[in-house]
Image: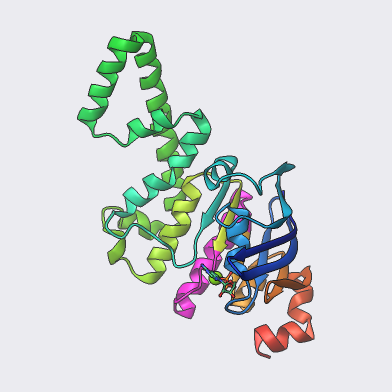
Amino acid sequence: MLAVRDVIAAYGPIVALHGISLEVQEGSIVTVLGANGAGKSSTLRAISGLLRPKEGAIEFEGRRIDRMSAEEIVALGISHVPEGRQLFSELTVLENLRLGAYSRFARAHGDGRRVHREDLSPLGRLRHDLFHAATGGIRDAAREIGQYRRRRRDFEAALNQVFEHFPILAERRKQMSGTLSGGEQQMLAIARGLMANPRLLLLDEPSMGLAPMVTQEIFRIIETINRTQGMTILLVEQNASLALDIAHRGYVLETGRIVLADTSENLQKDEAVRRSYLGY
Ligand SMILES: Nc1ncnc2c1ncn2[C@@H]1O[C@H](COP(=O)(O)OP(=O)(O)O)[C@@H](O)[C@H]1O
Ligand SMILES: [Mg+2]
């Protein structure tokens, strides 16, 4: 589904990725392990269009994406849950989830203007529709209302699905996201990524800053999302032990280079991996 080939990427003079290659098979969980500064986030940023590769190629479902904008890449179905969550802390849980669904509609309808209407107040929408009815004809307005209803149903269905995975978010839907616990914020960040209905979910260190019990719960949910929905997931992590427990395959990244690639089972048995990343 995803192939990264010999990608070199840098921040000005600082080369973060020295020619990395990796593959993600549809339906699998693939993990990229590495210490702080190894280039894990940069790898995800290169895939999602936030860091432009200097050399190499990235293919998603047979298409070159390494020259596309981040918006185009999201629209193709790649959702990036960034390191440190990056939620809108002044917005509620529900509002954050609604923002996550934005690209879903952009993709479904290929029309930013209609998506924009969703963000209007009820009065604003009425005004918009009346204006549209007057200028574009009543048929257009009727079609818009139909689309709006479909989008509404689509949104509700997506919401119900993420609430099934994260019931606590349903309880806290009206709460400002800045007042959630760290674990709940991470859940919300993942849920927001899922609202875009991605084909590939990129997760950047979901365990960061969380207590072991909370991390375990989140990893169990990530595994469930993969198993029950067939969601393809690329997970970068410093917590090698937990990541290898749920991933099918793994890569080990050291200072911008892939030094090992194997099944999780083999990596768990590997002497060097045990010593450097598993601590036994
Ligand atoms: N915005 C940036 N500007 C300059 N250097 C950066 C920036 N982000 C990351 N780097 C450097 O790129 C390398 C890889 O970083 P990163 O991909 O964040 O690693 P990881 O996610 O594995 O901790 C590091 O040497 C880091 O200092
Ligand atoms: Mg990082």
What kind of secondary structure does the magenta stretch mostly adopt?
helix
- Bounds of the magenta segment: 204-233
Provide residue 103's location: percent of width, then percent of height: 48, 41
Q: Residue 154: x, y in percent? A: 45, 35
Question: How has the structure been colored for display?
Answer: rainbow
Report which quarter residue 150 is drawn in: top left
Q: Is residue 23 above or below residue 199?
A: below
The answer to which of 111 and 104 lies nearer the viewer is 111
Q: Is residue 33 shown above or below 137?
A: below
Q: Is residue 233 left or right of residue 141?
A: right
Residue 250: give x, y in percent of width and height. 72, 68
Residue located at (42% from left, 38% from top): 155
- The foreground one among 67 and 280 is 67
Horizontal side of 87 relative to 2 (left or right) equals: left
- Report if residue 61 is visible in the image: no
To which quarter of the image does residue 224 belong? bottom right
Give the residue at x 67% y 67%. Answer: 17
Is residue 275 rendered to the left or right of residue 100? Answer: right
Q: Residue furthest front?
A: 13
* Label tally: 0
Q: Quadrant of ligand 1?
A: bottom right
Could you tell me which quadrant the C terminus lies in? bottom right
Q: Is residue 160 visible?
A: yes
Does residue 93 belong to the magenta stretch?
A: no
Q: Is residue 213 part of the magenta span, yes or no?
A: yes
Say above or below: 105 vs 270. Answer: above
